[in-house]
Amino acid sequence: MSLATNRRDAFPGSLVDEADDVEAPLAGGVDLSRIERAIREVLCAVGEDPDREGLRETPRRVARMYAELFSGLREDPRTHLRKFFTEKYDEIVLVRDISFESVCEHHLMPFMGKAHLGYLPNGRVVGLSKLARVVEGVARRPQVQERMTETIADLVMEELQPKGVAVVVEAVHTCMTVRGVRKPGSVCVTSAMKGAFRNNPSTRAEIMTLIYGDRR
C-alpha cells in the first residue's frame, strides 16, 4: 500500500510537545473534547463513576494519549525522504532495531517492537535518522502490522528509487498477549521485499544475514 493515494500532504502541528495540563479542546486536527466525552461514556458503560477522584482526569489523559499515538495521521512520512544526497555507493544500507509503538486498528490496543529497514542505493542516499523518522511517522496511526511493513517499503522505493528495499518488522501485540488467546512472549514478524531483494535470492539472503546474523 502506498500513502501516495491518501496522504499526499503533510499536516503541520504535533500534540506531543504540548504540556499535559494545557487545555486544547481542538488541537492539531484532533477533537479532544469529543474523545473526552466518549471516554466518559465508556466508563459509565462498564459500571464506573467517571467523577470519582481517580477517574476525574482520565478522559482528558486518554484524549491526549490518542492524539499522540495517532499523530502520524497528520504527517506525511515521505517528506523525510525528499532531502537526499547523490553518492556512488551501491552496497546495502541498513538501519537495524528501530523501535516503534503503534496501535492495532481491530481492538485499538498497542503493538510495539522494532523495524529493520535496508535499501540498495541507485545514486541516492538519505540521512540515517530519516529512515527512523519514516518508521515513526508510519507507526503512529491505527493499522495492522502487515500494512505498516508494506507502506514503509513503498515509501522508500517511491522516493529514493533504489535498486531494492527490504523491511522486516517484529512486534508484540497486546491484543493477543493480554486478552483473547493470551499468549505472552509471542512475536509477529512481517517482511516486505522490493526490487533486488525480491528478485535476487543472494541479495535477499545477504540482507537477512545482516539483520539477524547469528541471533536466530
Image (tube, helix red, strand yellow):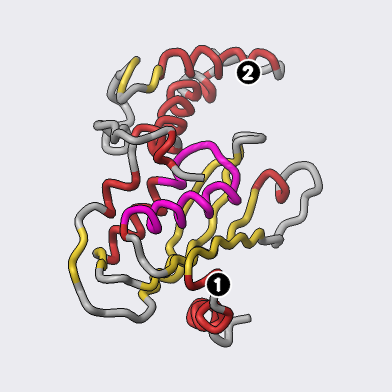
Q: Residue at x 25, y 32 (%)?
A: 12
Q: Which residues are magenta?
A: 138-159
On screen, residue 62 versus residue 24, left or right, reads: right
Viewer-side residue, 99 vs 39: 99
Dominant SS type (magenta): helix
Q: Nearer the viewer, residue 123 or 212?
A: 123
User: Hey, what amino acid is under mark 2?
Assistant: Val
On screen, residue 10 above or below 95: above
> Within the image, what quadrant is residue 204 found in?
bottom right
Check the image and report above or below for 7 versus 157: above
Percent across and percent down for residue 156 are 38, 57
Q: Which residue is mark 2?
A: 42
- Vertically, is 195 above or below 9? below
Spatial CA distance of label 2 from label 1 is 50 Å
Please indicate, yes or no, whether residue 10 appears anywhere in the rendered image. yes
Examine the rendering and report whether any part of residue 68 can be seen: no
**Residue 19 in picture, x, y percent from top left:** 27, 32
* Residue type marked 1: Asn
The residue singled out by tag 1 in the image is 199
The residue lying furthest to the bottom in this view is 214
- At which x and y percent is residue 99? 45, 60
